[in-house]
Image (tube, rainbow, N blue to C red):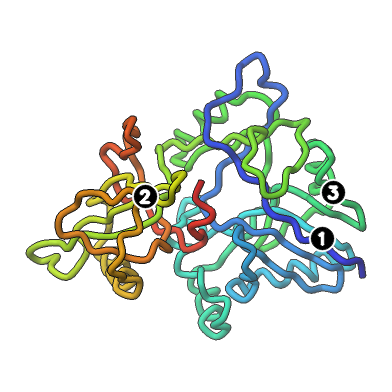
Amino acid sequence: MPTLPRIAPMLATPGTLPPASEDDRWAYETKLDGQRAIVYLPGDGTVLLRARSGADITGAYPELRAIGEALGDVAAVLDGEIVALDEHGHSDFERLQARMGLAGSPARAAHMAKEVPARLMLFDALFLEGRDLTAQPWTERRDRLETLELRGRNWSTPGALVGHGAQALEATREAGLEGLVCKRTDARYEPGVRSRSWIKIRHVRTVDVIVGGWLPGRGRLSGLPGSLLVGRPGLDGLRYAGAVGTGWTDRERTTLAELLRVAATEDCPFHPRPSVPGARWVLPRLVGEVAYATITRAGLLRHPAWHRLRPDLTPDDVA
């Protein structure tokens, strides 16, 4: 069997639709709300799943192991997204969170596979039958992926539309989907790069942040976080981006309280130190996604609301 190359995922840049004059040079895919995975299939019936961070997450999704048998003796490295679908067939990150972090708990992972089945959505072929495809244009990689005909109970290859970007964007908005990913049809695959050849458009404006502290709630929220103090990477370290005090369910707030307790520290992780009376600091290792209206010139989020915890990301992934 050939040795499969380790390939870091290519990342999309937030943006807007390409100019109408270039529309036919772009392909459009529905933006999925799940956990990114590079899929290693050595051709011996096995599979290895690696998260965006490079961590081995194969054990968290036992129902996806059979894709190795489905591909047979074909050696491949594929790119995709692991999702959990809601009752409308839409990817639902909150549902998937129950599956994440279980790579080291096989019994729990097997139980949850029945409760919340995962599905692997494949959208790129990076290596196939001994050939590195990353230098090839998207059109060729996509053709090679589709020839594999990977359609099963727990995996599929969603369609991509070339041209008609405005219609695709509106269709995803009307369907209540997260957004659209635009990909240049002549672009190579750039491992580990946040590239302008892939543009992601979210219908809700969000940003990844790193939690550096919190403020206790009052009344019935006593002992629980009333707001989180979040930041973004800056030239001198973690730069304060504001306080987020809305957007949680009671369950999420309780989960966050435990994570904050474990990460407690006496040292402020922000540079420069913000003036926030009563702040409690934590080690800057928790990543979340926050919805917001705009970002001020000072780098503060206006009208931020908690969107979701991102256990699949590390602080190094926040850019």
Label 2: element kind: strand
Q: Residues within 10 Å of mark 1 (few under 14, many from 20)?
A: few
Quadrant in the picture for residue 262: bottom left
**Residue, disc 1:** 5
Q: Position of residue 18 (x, y in %)?
A: 60, 23
Q: Which mark is residue 147?
A: 3
Q: Of circles 3 and 2, which is in front? A: 2
Q: Residue at x 28, y 69 (%)?
A: 266
Q: Of circles 2 and 1, which is in front? A: 2
From the viewer's side, name the closer residue of 34 and 263: 263
Q: Position of residue 149 (x, y in %)?
A: 80, 53
Q: Residue at x 58, y 73 (%)?
A: 60
From the viewer's side, name the closer residue of 273 and 36: 273
Label 3: element kind: helix
Q: Residue furthest left?
A: 219
Q: Quadrant of the N terminus?
A: bottom right
| Position above or below: 185 against 92 | above
Q: Which mark is residue 64?
A: none
From the viewer's side, name the closer residue of 37 and 213: 213
**Residue, disc 2:** 231
The span from disc 3 to disc 2 (Cα, nearest Å) is 44 Å
Which one is earlier in the sequence, the residue at label 2 or at label 1?
1
